[in-house]
Image (tube, coloured by chain):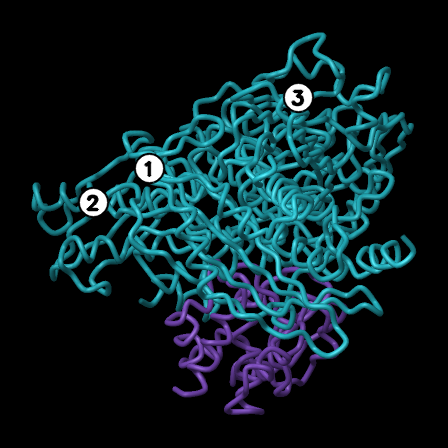
C-alpha cells in the first residue's frame, strides 16, 4: 500500500509551512530574553527600525495584552513588561528577507533588570517563593483558585481507589519507596515551528501553519481577541513531525500581528535553536513511587506522587485538568487493591511544558514500571512472572475503576515471551534483559469529510485534518476505496481549509485511524445512499463517544549490553508486542510501532534539554541528540491479533503504544545487567558508571 | 555575486550574496525540497549532491558552491524516480520533512555501492535523522531501490 502523499514528499514537491511563498511576503525574526526572570526596563529599536528592508519592529506595547493558550490563556504574544523564561519573545521584526530580519533583531537593544527566579518545582512550591504569575488563578481556563497552596501551582489532581493506602503499605510483606526523574525533552520533530499569516482587505486572516489541529487553532486565535473563529481561515499543510508538539497557537498570534501591522504576508519560521529554547517540550518530572506486595508476590498498594515542571506558561496543555493525562494511567495494567495517584504541575521560570507522544505517560510509566520491577526483585520474584501474576484479567476493572470490553494483557505478555530470544552480549560486556508494560484506551474524535464523485467513476475525499505523517490520508484512501469497491488510485485525498468543512479535533491521542474508520464508513454510506452525480458531494461527520470501551496493551522487552569499563549502554535488541484488533494498513502500523520504539530509545539514552540556571543549554541538534540509523537496534514487532476495536474499522490505537514503556524496559534491562537501579533519564554512560562504581564500593 | 551552477542538469546563473548558504539559494530559487532542520549540519534534511557527494547545504556558502554540479531531490525525481518510489511504497517516510535529504543520500550511496549491506546503509545514512520511522523502513526502502 503506497502512501498517498509518498511521491510528493520524496521528490520535494510537498509544500510545508516554511515552503509557502505569498506575493510580497516578508520574513520574521524574534528577539528573545536571555534571562529566566526579569523586568523589561527599556527597548530601543531605533537602529533596527532604520535598517533598509525592515518593515516593522513590534514590542509588547505594540501587540496588546491579549493572552493565548490551548486551555489556560496565559501566554502573551510578546512579553508584557516582564519575561518569565529564557527564550521568551520580547520583540519581533518583519523584513524583506530573513537575513535582514535577523540582523535587525540583533540590533534591538533591550535593557533587563533581573528578578528572582524559581527554576524547579521544589523552588516554586517552597514557602515564600517568588510568584511566576501574580494571579495565575485569574487567567481564563485556570483550574487553580486564589489562595491555593502551594504557590505557583498550575494544576493538581488526585485519584484514589480501594483500601487505605498507608495501611495497605504498612501491611505489605515487601515494599519499595523510590524516586525517579526525567528531564525536559523536546519532541525532536525535524521541522521547526513555522507559519505564514496574511490579512485580507476584509480583515480576515489566512494562516498556513505547522499545526496538527487547524480548527482548534482558529478558535485559539480568535477567542482571546473577541473575534469569531470564522475570521481566520487556516490552510492545511503537511506537518513535518508533531509528536504532540504542534497543537498550540505558538507563533501564529505574533505572525498575525506582524502581517496586520505591515499589510503584507509574513512568514515566521523558527531556527531550530529557538525551537529547543522556546517551544513546548515534555515536562521534566520527579516521581515518588511507593509500592507493596504480599508474601505471594501480589501487589497490595501503589502510591504515586508526580511533580511536573510546567514552566512559565500553562497554555501549552489542552486538557481541562491542565495536567498530564498519563498520570492517570499509573498502575492501570495491574490488579491493585489500594491505589493513590497525585499529580502536581508547577509554574517555574523555565521553558513552558507541553505535550509529547502520550503526554505524561512516559514519565509515569518509567517511574512505576521501574518501581514494580524493583518490587519484584525485593520480593524474590522474576520480574516477568511477577507482572504476569498481577496483570488485569478479562472482566477486571482497572484500579481506578475503568472497565473494558476485554483485557488482553496476559495474552500480549505471553506472545512477547514466546517470541523472545536472548541475544548474547559481546565478550566482556554485561547482558541485561528488561520488560515494561503499558496500556491505553482508544477513542474517536470530532471530525468531518466530504466525498465528491468524479467523472470516470473515481472520487475525491476532502478531509478536515492535516497529514502529520502517521498516515491518516492514506487510511482515508484505503477505506474509501474499500468501501466503494474502487482501486486506491481512483480515490484522491485533498485537505480543505477550515472554511470548508465542519470542525475536526486534530491529529492526536492515538485516535486517528479509529476516527477515520468511522468517518469513512459514514461517508461511504452517504455516498451509496445519495449516489451523487459527478461534481456533486456528500458530507459526513463524527463526534466522540458511543464506542465500546477498549484498552490496548503493549509489552516492551529490551536487551542491553553494558560496558563495565565505561558504563555505556548498547542496545542489542528490542521486542515490542502489541494487542491489536483489525489493522487497516499493516506496513504503516508496523512503522508507527518501530518509530515509536526508536523515539523512546532516544529519550531513554540520549535526550536532555540540559536546563542549567533556567537556560536550555542543549540548544542545537548536536547537543540535543536524536537517535540516528546507527543507534537504532534490531526491532522485532509482535502483534496479537483478534482484539475488539473501536469504530467501523474495528481498530485499537497505535500511535502512542510504541514509545511509552520503552525507557522503563531499558532501565530494567540495565538493572538486570549491573545490579543497580537507574532512577533518572537519560541513562548516560556517566550515570551507569556511577552506579557501577557505587556498587563496587558498597 | 552571479553564481553559476549546473543545477539538476541545467546550467543556471543565480544572483545572490556570496555569504548566503546554498540551502537558502536553492530554496529562494524555488527548490524547496531541501529543508532547513537543525541548520547546523547535523540532521541532514538539507542534503543535496554537490559534485556527486551528499552535502549539508545549510553549511555550504554560495561562494563555495560556485561552478558546482548540484542535484536536489527535485532533480532526482526525474533522474532516478525509482528511489522516491521505493520510499513511498515501503513506508520509508511518514511526515516527509527529512525525506528529500534521505533520498539524496540514498542515491549517493547506491551510486557508490549498488548493493549495500544493512550495516553499510546504517553507516552511510547516519547523517540523515528521521524522527518518525525508526529507520528500519528507510533501510527497507533503500534495499528495494537497490533491487529495482
Q: Which comes before the other along the chain, label 3 or label 2?
A: 3
Q: CA distance from mark 3 to mark 1?
A: 45 Å
Q: Chain of mark 2?
A: A
Residue B147, image quadrant: bottom left
> Which circle, 3 or 2, is nearer the viewer?
3
Q: CA distance from mark 2 to mark 1?
A: 13 Å
Q: Chain of mark 1?
A: A
Chain B shade:
purple
Residues marked 3 and 1 touching at CB (< 8 Å): no
Other residues around mark 2 within 10 Å, as few (<14) / some (14–19) / many (≥20):
many
Residues marked 3 and 2 touching at CB (< 8 Å): no
**Which residue was labeled with disc 3?**
A166
Question: Taking the image as drawn, is residue B46 in sight?
Answer: no
Image quadrant for the N terminus of chain A? Answer: bottom left
**Which residue was labeled with disc 2?**
A521
**Which residue was labeled with disc 1?**
A447
> Which circle, 2 or 1, is nearer the viewer?
2
* Placement of B139 over or under A123, stated as above or below: below
**Residue that appears at 84% across and 41% down:** A47
- Pointer 2 and pointer 1 on the same chain: yes
**Residue that appears at 89% across and 52% down:** A698
Q: Chain of mark 3?
A: A
Q: CA distance from mark 3 to mark 2?
A: 50 Å
Amino acid at each position: 500500500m503506497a502512501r498517498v502523499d509518498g511521491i510528493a514528499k520524496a521528490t520535494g514537491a510537498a509544500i510545508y509551512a516554511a515552503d509557502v511563498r505569498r506575493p510580497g511576503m516578508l520574513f520574521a525574526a524574534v528577539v528573545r530574553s536571555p534571562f529566566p526572570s526579569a523586568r523589561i526596563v527599556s527597548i530601543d529599536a531605533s537602529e533596527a527600525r532604520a535598517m533598509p528592508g525592515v518593515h516593522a519592529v513590534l514590542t509588547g506595547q505594540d501587540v496588546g495584552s491579549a493572552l493565548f493558550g490551548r486551555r489556560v490563556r496565559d501566554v502573551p504574544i510578546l512579553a508584557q513588561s516582564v519575561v518569565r523564561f529564557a527564550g521568551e519573545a520580547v520583540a519581533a521584526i518583519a523584513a524583506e528577507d530573513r537575513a535582514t530580519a535577523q540582523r535587525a533583531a540583533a540590533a534591538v537593544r533591550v535593557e533587563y533588570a533581573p528578578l528572582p527566579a524559581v527554576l524547579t518545582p521544589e523552588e516554586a512550591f517552597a514557602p515564600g517563593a517568588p510568584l511566576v504569575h501574580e494571579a495565575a488563578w485569574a487567567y481564563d481556563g485556570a483550574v487553580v483558585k486564589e489562595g491555593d497552596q502551594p504557590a505557583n501551582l498550575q494544576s493538581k489532581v488526585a485519584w484514589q481507589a480501594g483500601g487505605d493506602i498507608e495501611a495497605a503499605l504498612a501491611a505489605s510483606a515487601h515494599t519499595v519507596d523510590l524516586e525517579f526523574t526525567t528531564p525536559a525533552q523536546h519532541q525532536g520533530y525535524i521541522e521547526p515551528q513555522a507559519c505564514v499569516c496574511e490579512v485580507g482587505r476584509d480583515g480576515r486572516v489566512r494562516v498556513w501553519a505547522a499545526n496538527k489541529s487547524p480548527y482548534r487553532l482558529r478558535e485559539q486565535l480568535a477567542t482571546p481577541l473577541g473575534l469569531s473563529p470564522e475570521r481566520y481561515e487556516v490552510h492545511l499543510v503537511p506537518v513535518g513531525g508533531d509528536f504532540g508538539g504542534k497543537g498550540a497557537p505558538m507563533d501564529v498570534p505574533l505572525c498575525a500581528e506582524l502581517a496586520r501591522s505591515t499589510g503584507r504576508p509574513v512568514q515566521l519560521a523558527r531556527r531550530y535553536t529557538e525551537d529547543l529554547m522556546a517551544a513546548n517540550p515534555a515536562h521534566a518530572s520527579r516521581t515518588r513511587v511507593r509500592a507493596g506486595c504480599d508474601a505471594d508476590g501480589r501487589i497490595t498498594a501503589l502510591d504515586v506522587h508526580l511533580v511536573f515542571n510546567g514552566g512559565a506558561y500553562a497554555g501549552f496543555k489542552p486538557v481541562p485538568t491542565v495536567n498530564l493525562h498519563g498520570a492517570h494511567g499509573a498502575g492501570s495494567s495491574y490488579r491493585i487493591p489500594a491505589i493513590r495517584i497525585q499529580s502536581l504541575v508547577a509554574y517555574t521560570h523555565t521553558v513552558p511544558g507541553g505535550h509529547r507522544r502520550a503526554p505524561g505517560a512516559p514519565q509515569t510509566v518509567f517511574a512505576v514500571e521501574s518501581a514494580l520491577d524493583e518490587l519484584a526483585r525485593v520480593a524474590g520474584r522474576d520480574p516477568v512472572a511477577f507482572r504476569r501474576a498481577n496483570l488485569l484479567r478479562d472482566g477486571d476493572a482497572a484500579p481506578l475503576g475503568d472497565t473494558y470490553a476485554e483485557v488482553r494483557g496476559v495474552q500480549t505478555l505471553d506472545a512477547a515471551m514466546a517470541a523472545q530470544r536472548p541475544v548474547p552480549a559481546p565478550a566482556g560486556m554485561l547482558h541485561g534483559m528488561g520488560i515494561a508494560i503499558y496500556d491505553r484506551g482508544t477513542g474517536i474524535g470530532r471530525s468531518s469529510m466530504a466525498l465528491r464523485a468524479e467523472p470516470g467513476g473515481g472520487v475525491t475525499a476532502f478531509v478536515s485534518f492535516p497529514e502529520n505523517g502517521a498516515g491518516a490520508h492514506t487510511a482515508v484512501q484505503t477505506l474509501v476505496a474499500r468501501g466503494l469497491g474502487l482501486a486506491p488510485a481512483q480515490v484522491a485525498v485533498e485537505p480543505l481549509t477550515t472554511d470548508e468543512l465542519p470542525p475536526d479535533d486534530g491529529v492526536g491521542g492515538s485516535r486517528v485511524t479509529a476516527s477515520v474508520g468511522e468517518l469513512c464508513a459514514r461517508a461511504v454510506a452517504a455516498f451509496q445512499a445519495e449516489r451523487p452525480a459527478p461534481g456533486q458531494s456528500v458530507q459526513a461527520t463524527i463526534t466522540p463517544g458511543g464506542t465500546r470501551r477498549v484498552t490496548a496493551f503493549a509489552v516492551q522487552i529490551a536487551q542491553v549490553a553494558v560496558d563495565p569499563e565505561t558504563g555505556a549502554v548498547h542496545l542489542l535488541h528490542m521486542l515490542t508486542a502489541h494487542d491489536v484488533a483489525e489493522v487497516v494498513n499493516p506496513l504503516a502500523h508496523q512503522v508507527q510501532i518501530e518509530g515509536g520504539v526508536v523515539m523512546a530509545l532516544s529519550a531513554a539514552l540520549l535526550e536532555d534539554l540540559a536546563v542549567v540556571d533556567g537556560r536550555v543549554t542543549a540548544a542545537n541538534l548536536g547537543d540535543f541528540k536524536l537517535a540516528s540509523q546507527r543507534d537504532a537496534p534490531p526491532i522485532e514487532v509482535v502483534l496479537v491479533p483478534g482484539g475488539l476495536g473501536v469504530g467501523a474499522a474495528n481498530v485499537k490505537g497505535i500511535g502512542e503504544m510504541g514509545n511509552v514503556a520503552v525507557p522503563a524496559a531499558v532501565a530494567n534491562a540495565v538493572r538486570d545487567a549491573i545490579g543497580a537501579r537507574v532512577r533518572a533519564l537519560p541513562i548516560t554512560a556517566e550515570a551507569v558508571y556511577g552506579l557501577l562504581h557505587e556498587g563496587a564500593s558498597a | 555575486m552571479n553564481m553559476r551552477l549546473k543545477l539538476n542538469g541545467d546550467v543556471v546563473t543565480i544572483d545572490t550574496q556570496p555569504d548566503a548558504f546554498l540551502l537558502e539559494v536553492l530554496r529562494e530559487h524555488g527548490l524547496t525540497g531541501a529543508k532547513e532542520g537543525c541548520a547546523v549540519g547535523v540532521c541532514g534534511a538539507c542534503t543535496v549532491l554537490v559534485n556527486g557527494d551528499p552535502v549539508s547545504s545549510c553549511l555550504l556558502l554560495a561562494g563555495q558552491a560556485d561552478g558546482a554540479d548540484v542535484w536536489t531531490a527535485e532533480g532526482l525525481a526525474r533522474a532516478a524516480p525509482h528511489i522516491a518510489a521505493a520510499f513511498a511504497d515501503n513506508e520509508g517516510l511518514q511526515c516527509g520533512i527529512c525525506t528529500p535529504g534521505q533520498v539524496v543520500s540514498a542515491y549517493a550511496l547506491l551510486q557508490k555501492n549498488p548493493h549495500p549491506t544493512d550495516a553499510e546503509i546504517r553507516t552511510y545514512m547516519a547523517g540523515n535523522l528521521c524522527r518518525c520511522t525508526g529507520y528500519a523502513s528507510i533501510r527497507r526502502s533503500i534495499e528495494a531501490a537497490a533491487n529495482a
